[in-house]
Image (cartoon, helix red, strand yellow):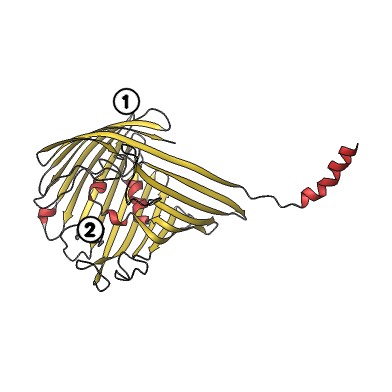
Amino acid sequence: MKKWILACSLVPCCASVPAWSQSSVTLFGRADVSVQTGNAGGTRITRLDSSNVAPSVWGLLGSEDLGGGYRAIFKLEDGFNPTTGSIAGSGNLFGREAWVGLNGPFGQVQFGVNYTPFFTTLVTFAQGPLSTWGWGNASNNYFFLGTTRNSNSVRYNSPTFAGLTLRASYSNGSNGDPTLPGNLGRTFSAGLAYRLGQFSADVDYLQQSAAKTTPVNAGTTTVQGNYVMAAVMYDFDWIQPAFIFQTHRGGQNVAASSTTTFQNPNNNYYDLSVLIRHIGPGIFMLDFGQYKRLGNSSGDSTSYAIRYDYSLSKRTGVYAGVGHVRNGSTATFTMSGAQGAGLPTKPGASVTSFVLGMITRF
């Protein structure tokens, strides 16, 4: 009886304690390892690769329910090389993504290291069965990698209205570094995404400040690089074509891309990818694209690829592909993986590559 009386007396006290909000933290990742062999400028190269179809990464994703339809969110993601165990990319811990934000009826806002809306479109429309924007996609071979993500940035995704979603991001570039121009690398990107049934379309704009001359110091003059991209895709079930077209202006006729100075030659490129399903247990990916350097056709390039991906389970798959890049006399493009450098080549040399790999997720 005493125990029953004591339990009843505690009910009001317990009821007065506020309930803790629901929160979660998820550990996630994937590892992609392959063997790649190819002929690059007359030189035969065979090597063990990481991250050809998808970047090998691990990270933490978290959220907390704040009530009223609002959630505090964060993401930390780091790239690594499973063939050596080393940190990949910039070498920074969580150099791929590192942001904290808020999600609610207004949409979602993120602060830290964020991908640009430009990159979001690329990884949506540069198709691949096991992962997008990887080995075989022409847009991966020809894209200026300095604009995929930005440090010191804020990103906003709006709610979806009538199939339309607005995405925008802004990065402060050098962020007050006294040894660099104040606006070097400063980036603004915005885009509209439209979804209606099996049809998808995106339009994006990106502006980035680049150094006009080298070496770069606090007094270096900067110029604006302006990028525009449009992409469309339609899913017919058995076949799914997608097309990307991008332009860049403001490059001051620089000779080559540079991630340090954010320079990129004026160019146009396009990427046509097609997924073909229901032919055997896997999915075929066919891809064709061309890069045109404005004012200097010797910098042009053409890319071809075919890849076959087969899912062993929901988390694990294998892939095999062959690709070819034909370069103009001054171009040095190659078959690029999703992370890390492709097979090295020399100006004007063509590259033919074969890849066989496996990817698993956790």
Label 2 SS: loop
Q: Nearer the viewer, residue 263 or 142?
A: 263
Q: Identify residue type, mark 2.
A: Ser
**In the image, residue 323 lies at what x, y percent?**
20, 38
Which residue is nearer to you in this view: 82 or 348? 82
Q: Callout 1: few (<14), some (14-19), or many (20+) C-alpha neighbours within 10 Å?
A: few
Quarter of the image where the N terminus is located: top right
- Secondary structure under the numbered disc 1 in the rendered image: loop
Residue 239 place in picture, x, y as percent: 32, 36
Please name the residue that numbered disc 1 is placed on: 280
Quarter of the image for residue 6 reads: top right
**Tag nearer the camera, 2 or 1:** 2
Q: Amino acid at mark 1?
A: Gly
- Return the residue nearer the eye: 55 or 138: 55
Figure quadrant of residue 334: top left
Q: Is residue 39 left or right of residue 188?
A: left
Residue at 21 percent across and 64 percent down: it is 251
Distance CA(mark 2)–CA(mark 1): 42 Å
- Name the residue that disc number 2 marks: 258
Image height of 155 relative to 236, above or below: below
Q: Which mark is residue 338?
A: none
Instruction: Decide: few, some or many residues near mark 2? Use Cα within 10 Å; few <14, some 14-19, many ≥20.
Output: some
Residue 124 position, x and y percent, is 36, 47
Indicate left or right for 225 with 56 as reference: left
Say left or right for 31 vs 140: right
Quadrant into which the C terminus falls: top left
